[in-house]
């Protein structure tokens, strides 16, 4: 099972719960500790998005999920997540190995900015009394570090880059700049959008002021590495109050109240067969033997987290990052549009993540270059209608691609 190419980066200060979130999201065992720099190298793992499986909508009994998992009618779709070591103020200037840590974010498509919503971790990652630190300030600090880091990358040899591109007289400024920034997973559409938004599209690069370059990079960061705020440790005192304030302070951001520790416990107990719990659910069922302490903790989780927020937040965070922020949709390619099967007779084996706005032909290319080249038409298996190459795929589409025999 291959995870899609999407990479979700987990960022934040030390001790806010990044590794706990990572462990919960991936179910791999990573070291979790209450001390700085427990995670030194980027830790990449596989997490799963949760989405209603289309077999339910089609009224089928079951499916034969192959590149993903189907659990009780929910499709779990693999994506990559990366746990980055903690950032301290001044990270972009190299404080606390900050540059090295920030460099790990180059390949990320979207960032989960984890903060300690209870305010019980100081800027250096040392635990303090809940309510001591302001997570609003923390969010601003981390975004500042990321923006400054990205700015420093382009600023370094900007004069030379600007002169070279201007001198080349290319009409494809966005393409030329994107090539220069490809190491940051920045694409031509990202750059084109940033040029448009900043109004710098018709200005010679050598005439950009430092302020314009800075603003351009900030806009480009928002487009190419959008941030979802994870208000973690929502189970602790003061956290809910701070979460409410964060919603007012950051109206443009998605903010997910989360208890990574609760999710980790629920997944572990589910793995041990002691509870029935599907990641993302707002409840669980006790099915095994539990000691009284665990039972009490579970009661607390049910009442103060699951019922109150509709889940622990971990699954919600992953889904929000990919489906809402990156605007990805799911499409199921099949060979037989009547039986919804592939060539081997498997029902709906694969689900593919594509960006909203992807066409039927682009989907064919995504499956295989040859399929894209020899595309003739496609069939929408839900309606049995024939669709053309420019058809815009809809979330949950089941598609058969008809190609010329080569
Ligand atoms: N109460 C509470 N504690 C948490 C939560 N998530 C993590 N922690 C604790 O916070 C401390 C730091 O967690 P860790 O994941 O190592 O943080 P990192 O440095 O950001 O990777 C550990 O003691 C965790 O058990 C949470 O949701 N609630
Ligand atoms: Mg860590």
Image (spheres, rainbow, N blue to C red):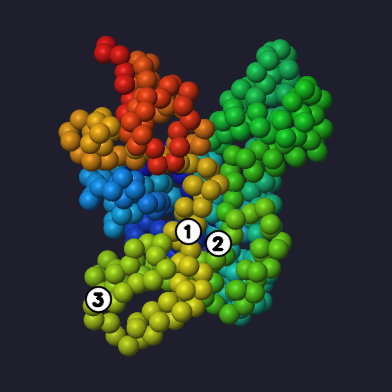
Q: Nearer the viewer, residue 187 or 376?
A: 376
| Total residue callouts | 3
> Which residue is rendered at x = 46% and y = 27% of the image?
391
Crowdedness near tag 2: few (<14), some (14–19) or many (≥20) residues, C-alpha within 10 Å: many
> Which residue is rendered at x = 39% and y = 71% of the image?
283
Residue 85, given in percent of the width and then of the height, sits at: 51, 56
Image mark for residue 287: 3
The answer to whether 252 appears left or right of 394 in the picture is right
> Which residue is rendered at x = 34% and y = 48% of the image?
57
Q: Earlier in the sequence, mark 1 or mark 3?
A: 3
Q: CA distance from mark 2 to mark 1?
A: 7 Å
Q: Which residue is mark 2?
A: 256
Q: Which quadrant is home to the C terminus?
A: top left
Q: Which residue is mark 1?
A: 316
Whether label 1 touches label 3, CB < 8 Å: no
Q: Earlier in the sequence, mark 3 or mark 2?
A: 2
Q: CA distance from mark 1 to mark 3?
A: 25 Å
The answer to whether 126 appears left or right of 73 in the picture is right
Q: Nearer the viewer, residue 384 or 288?
A: 384
């Amino acid at each position: 099972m291959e995870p899609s190419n999407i990479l979700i980066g987990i960022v934040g200060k030390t001790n806010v719960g990044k590794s706990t979130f990572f462990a919960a999201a991936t179910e791999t065992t990573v070291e979790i500790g209450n001390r700085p720099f427990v995670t030194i190298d980027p830790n990449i793992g596989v997490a799963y998005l949760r989405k209603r499986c289309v077999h339910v909508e089609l009224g089928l009994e079951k499916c034969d999920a192959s590149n993903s998992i189907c659990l009780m009618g929910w499709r779990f779709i693999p994506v990559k997540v990366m746990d980055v070591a903690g950032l301290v103020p001044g990270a972009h200037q190299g404080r606390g190995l900050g540059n090295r840590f920030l460099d790990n974010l180059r390949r990320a498509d979207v960032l989960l900015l984890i903060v300690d919503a209870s305010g019980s971790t100081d800027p250096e990652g040392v635990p303090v009394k809940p309510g001591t630190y302001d997570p609003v300030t923390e969010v601003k600090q981390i975004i500042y570090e990321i923006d400054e880091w990205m700015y420093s990358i382009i600023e370094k040899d900007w004069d030379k880059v600007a002169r070279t591109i201007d001198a080349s007289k290319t009409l494809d400024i966005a393409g030329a700049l994107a090539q220069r920034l490809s190491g940051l997973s920045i694409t031509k559409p990202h750059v084109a959008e940033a040029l448009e938004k900043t109004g710098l599209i018709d200005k010679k690069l050598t005439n950009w002021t430092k302020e314009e370059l800075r603003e351009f990079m900030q806009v480009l960061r928002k487009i190419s590495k959008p941030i979802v705020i994870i208000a973690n440790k929502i189970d602790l005192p003061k956290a809910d109050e701070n979460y409410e304030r964060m919603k007012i302070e950051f109206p443009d951001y998605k903010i997910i109240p989360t208890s990574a520790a609760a999710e980790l416990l629920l997944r572990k107990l589910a793995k041990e067969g002691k509870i029935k719990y599907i990641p993302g659910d707002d409840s669980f069922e006790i099915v095994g033997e539990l000691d009284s302490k665990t039972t009490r903790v579970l009661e607390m989780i049910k009442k103060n987290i699951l019922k109150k927020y509709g889940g622990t937040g971990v699954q919600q965070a992953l889904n929000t990052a990919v489906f809402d922020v990156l605007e990805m949709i799911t499409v199921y390619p099949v060979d037989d549009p009547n039986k919804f099967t592939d060539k081997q007779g498997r029902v709906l084996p694969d689900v593919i993540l594509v960006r909203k706005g992807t066409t039927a032909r682009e989907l064919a290319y995504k499956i295989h270059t040859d399929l894209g080249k020899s595309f003739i038409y496609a069939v929408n298996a839900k309606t049995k209608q024939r669709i053309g190459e420019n058809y815009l795929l809809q979330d949950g589409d089941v598609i058969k691609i008809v190609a010329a025999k080569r």
